[in-house]
Amino acid sequence: MVPGLLLATGQVLPVTSVHRLARTSTLMRIIMDADGQVLDMGRKVRLATPAQRRAIFARYATCWIDGCPLPATLCQIDHADNWSTGGLTDLKLLGPACQFHNRDRYQHPHRYTRRQTGKDRWAFTYHGRTRRMQV
């Protein structure tokens, strides 16, 4: 049998093992920063990584809801598209939300309007309890 794959450890796998891995594995795209820290996680995990948190704190000074003064470093990391409805844990879709706005936006998405403020930055406008879903 001819060896199939030379791993980073120097171990050589037989072709049968390579075929088994090809049949039973899933490919996943991973985006990393210059230091090798993962920045885009897709649907693999819900919570932001420490590297993502650092990048978010560098990108945002406060909660991403207009007018909320809470510093980003005291906020929870929120998904621009709610995780429960298919949102991705990718850096370009994450931002800081204070506990109130994070929970409220999840429970009452119709109270918020999202807008893109840069290539990979978002902001939300809170409309309070009076805004209703427009059809």
Image: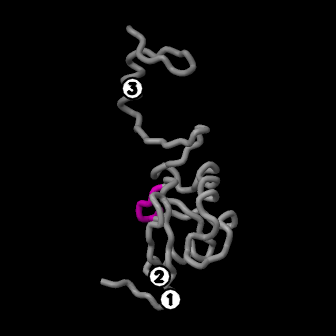
- Residue 76 is marked as none
Q: In the rendered view, would you say 37 is above or below 86? A: above
What's under tag 3, amino acid-wise? Arg
Q: Is residue 40 magenta?
A: no
Residue contact at pointers 2 and 1, CB within 8 angstroms:
yes
- Give the residues in magenta: 81-88
Q: The C terminus is located in which quarter?
A: bottom left
Under circle 3, the secondary element is helix
Q: Earlier in the sequence, mark 1 or mark 3?
A: 3
Tell me the chief SS of the magenta region. loop
Q: Which residue is mark 1?
A: 129
Kindly identify the residue that appears in the image at 67 percent across and 73 percent down: 70
Kindly identify the residue that appears in the image at 43 percent across and 41 percent down: 28
Q: Earlier in the sequence, mark 2 or mark 3?
A: 3
Q: Position of residue 59 (x, y in %)?
A: 59, 59
Q: Residue furthest left?
A: 135
- Residue 20 is marked as 3
Q: In the rendered view, would you say 110 is above or below 11? A: below
Under circle 1, the secondary element is helix
Q: Position of residue 54 (x, y in %)?
A: 64, 53
- Residue 111 is marked as 2
Q: Is residue 84 magenta?
A: yes
What's under tag 2, amino acid-wise? Arg
